Amino acid sequence: MYTLTGLKLKNPTILAAGVLGTTGASLCRVACEGGAGAVVTKSIGSTPKTGHPNPSMVKLDCGFLNAMGLPNPSYPGFLQELETAKKDSDVPVIASIFGGSPDEFKEVAEGLLPGKPDAFELNVSCPHAEGYGAAIGSNPCLVEAVTAAVKDVVNVPVWVKLTPNVSDITCIGNAAESGGADAVVAINTVKGMAIDIESGYPVLGNRSGGLSGKAIKPVAVKCVYDLYTALEIPVIGVGGVSSWQDAVEMMMAGATAVQVGSAVYDRLDIFSEISIGIEAFLKRRGYSDIKELIGLAHEMV
Ligand code: RRO
């Protein structure tokens, strides 16, 4: 068992927000069949949203480009899914939420409390959401205020998911910590665009979006490395993790646990595969505790 912000996880792998997180049934599948140590829901807001026009997700050679546009049924519409996820899965269920102001974040968090989420993940980092997401997540004062507002009304851990699309992610991480965050999650997707050269059109309906998958792993590792140095609270690493080696790398940079997003589209049991691989690595290298890996790269001078 691993302890992360007071939550008990059977292994340090977590389903990232946005992937297979829209229904209680899909969250359960990831936990039960996939072997995830915890699962995060799709980001939920205060009013229903249909999202951006199609195509809203495109597979590239180096990863995925998406501009889903925060499609979600709103917190009243999602409560039952959250209840199903809690009832049918045996792992912590973390509710990802978004809003355009501290009050809206507070409203969504309070609205989901009857579903008994084990923690909240505050999404202040979607790269293509007008007025939401990175508009908040690149402003330290707003990040601190949003975090404090949610902490004020919930008594479960609060994680804050950060955007890499800023000049200094540690400044935003510090603001989350000042607001009372129990952990930060790094990183959300990297702003990106792709163009079809035959038609000349950008491939996404929204024209631009966020890049995930293998291409962004080095960006994520650097962000985790810097946040580990700057903060006292745990850093949860996410971005391009698709193997146990990637997870170990993220932990050596400073991650206490890892989230997996895009790689889930290839194989659901990636979580079991990663946790078995980490255990075998620890044994082979003679480590007695996974904690010995966390931040190891910082000691290599
Ligand atoms: O729904 C999305 O378009 C989306 C979200 Br909320 C997010 O946080 N990151 C992303 O790449 N897409």
Image (spheres, rainbow, N blue to C red):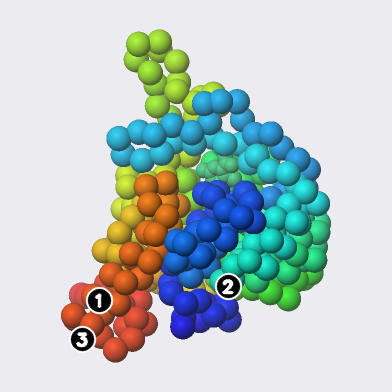
Q: Which residue carries the number 2 mark?
A: 90
Disc number at residue 227?
Answer: none
Q: Residue 177 placed where, x, y %?
A: 59, 70
Q: Nearer the viewer, residue 12 or 221?
A: 12
Q: Earlier in the sequence, mark 1 or mark 2?
A: 2
Residue type pointed to by label 1: Ala
Residue type pointed to by label 3: Gly
Residue visible at 37% across and 47% down? 266
Residue type pointed to by label 2: Asp
Instruction: Tell which residue pokes out farthest to the bottom in this image.
Output: 288
Q: Nearer the viewer, residue 168 or 217?
A: 217
Q: Residue 238 placed where, x, y %?
A: 43, 58
Q: Where 290 sits versus 179, above or below?
A: below
Spatial CA distance of label 1 from label 2 is 24 Å
Residue visible at 28% across and 70% down? 277
Nearer to us of marks 1 and 2 is 2
Disc number at residue 280?
Answer: 1
Nearer to us of marks 1 and 3 is 1
Residue visible at 34% across and 65% down? 274
Residue visible at 54% across and 50% down? 20
Cβ(mark 2) to ligand 1 < 8 Å? Answer: no
Disc number at residue 286?
Answer: 3
